[in-house]
Amino acid sequence: MFEDLLIELGINTLPEGWRFEILDDVCNGVFDCPHSTPKLSDNGPYAVRTQDIRNGFFDTTKAVKVSHKTYADRIKRAEPLFGDLLFSREGTYFGDAAEVPENTQVCLGQRMVLIKPKQEILDSTYLRAYINSSAFQRYLLRFRDGSVAERLNLSVIRKLPVLLPDIEYQKLIKNNIVPFEKKTSLNRQTNQTLEEIAQAIFKSWFVDFEPTKAKIAAREALLADYAKEQLSANAAQKAKAPSAENIAQAEIQAALESIAGVNKIVPTEQLQALVDLFPNQLVDSELGEIPMGWEVTPFSKLTKLTKGKNITKKTVVHGSVPVVAGGLKPSCYHNTANVKGPVITVSASGANAGYVNIYYTDVWASDCSFICSKATKYLYTNYVLLKLKQKLITSMQTGAAQPHIYPKDFDRLNVVNPGNNLFEIIEDIFSGLFNKIKYNELENTSLGEIRDILLPKLLSGDLPLECDN
């Protein structure tokens, strides 16, 4: 009955005692979400959306929240509890499953499904690993529905086949798979922190202009102290005005303190040259006040964006090269690349037109624009700049029926240009951070490949399993 799934799983013959069961039969319920958009709140339980189910985990970092009243209304049919699964049935992350985290209140947003395994016969972590395996994900694709977005109907989900070893064997499989997932999750958390560090540095220097403002504040404080001393001193003992050298030294010290966070990244001997690149005055511009001598320029004048080359499903030859189109993740995988990584991509069409991403491997740039290392010496700096302007870029969409953003649209994205000297320094800083991210990404790819090879072998009973004592 499930011969196609066995082929996908790489299993020739089921081990003795193993069987396929229909998902609904081994669960205490498979529940659809309320078909309404929840009213959001600043505080309260989480409302899980399809984009929050990432790589087998519920990513709470950008998850929205609802009031306790809204939560109570949305769990009337079923309350998500620790050990249950959250399943995305539509959209970019169609088919992904994650467990409800321990001690976490969460209700379903739109296009989500709640799966409640019967824990005495079906381990939730095993079920999550099984659903998220590349073999089962390929199997799911044959049931997708919807011309605009990939979608699974609830009736189909309830009838999905679950390969069921005995519960003890499921737990043994879990114990052999979870270490890969934990390392992958740790790498992702590390990468998120590293990217946040890069964004914080860029924002401090090129958005908030903190080193320049620190210089201004130091100078004004020094002059204010002098004026105060002038008023308090008697005529015979007038305070001595601060010299230009003293003012300059105070400005430098203040600027150094404002960039203290990069002291471990930038060599000490380069810090003086770095702070000298920040002016000590702000002037008006079309973007508001900016450091004196810096310019406002269209992003397209700084870096060349190139339009990708569309590829059709008929011409795709299955491989490992991501095909980057209009969505948030690759539309498919090809056997040939047309752009070498690392590369910045900007989705060109559809609801996610303008979405900025970075790939550290070679890609096939399709329905997107891209910036590669041949186009700029400041690849990582450009990426951080664009990510910080993501909302503004998205708002640049044109076209009513089919939103799009093309390279020419970046003529309308004005940015602050501090000059090549400062760009070179920050690119050196970012290269160190993003090379660590790249290493972690590549390691995660390898871990995923090992897991995808290991899981079918575990499911087929070909490998001995170790207990977790």
Image (cartoon, rainbow, N blue to C red):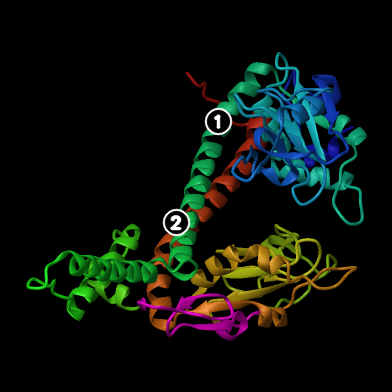
Provide the residue span drawn in magenta: 278-305
Quadrant of the drawing holding the N terminus: top right
Q: Which residue in the structure is indicated by mark 1? A: 176
Please rate how many residues cluster around mark 1, counting C-alpha atoms within 10 Å: few if below 14, some from 14 to 19, many from 20: some
- The picture quadrant where one finds residue 364 is bottom right
- The picture quadrant where one finds residue 256 is bottom left
Q: Nearer the viewer, residue 303 or 11?
A: 303
Instruction: Give the residue at x 44% y 56%.
Output: 197
SS at mark 2?
A: helix
Q: Which residue in the structure is indicated by mark 2? A: 197
Residue extending farthest top: 120
Q: Is residue 328 visible?
A: yes
Q: Nearer the viewer, residue 59 or 17?
A: 59
Q: Is residue 259 visible?
A: no
- In the image, residue 457 sits, relative to residue 198, either above or below, namely above
Residue type, label 2? Ile
Q: Nearer the viewer, residue 228 or 62?
A: 228
Marks 1 and 2, how far apart in space?
34 Å
Instruction: Give the residue at x 83% y 26%.
Output: 30
Along the horizontal axis of the image, is 330 left or right of 202?
right
- In the image, residue 7 sits, relative to residue 429, either above or below, namely above
Residue type, label 1? Asn
Residue 221 colored magenta?
no
The disc, 1 or 2, on the residue closer to the chain's N-terminal end is 1
- In the image, residue 361 sits, relative to residue 85, either above or below, namely below
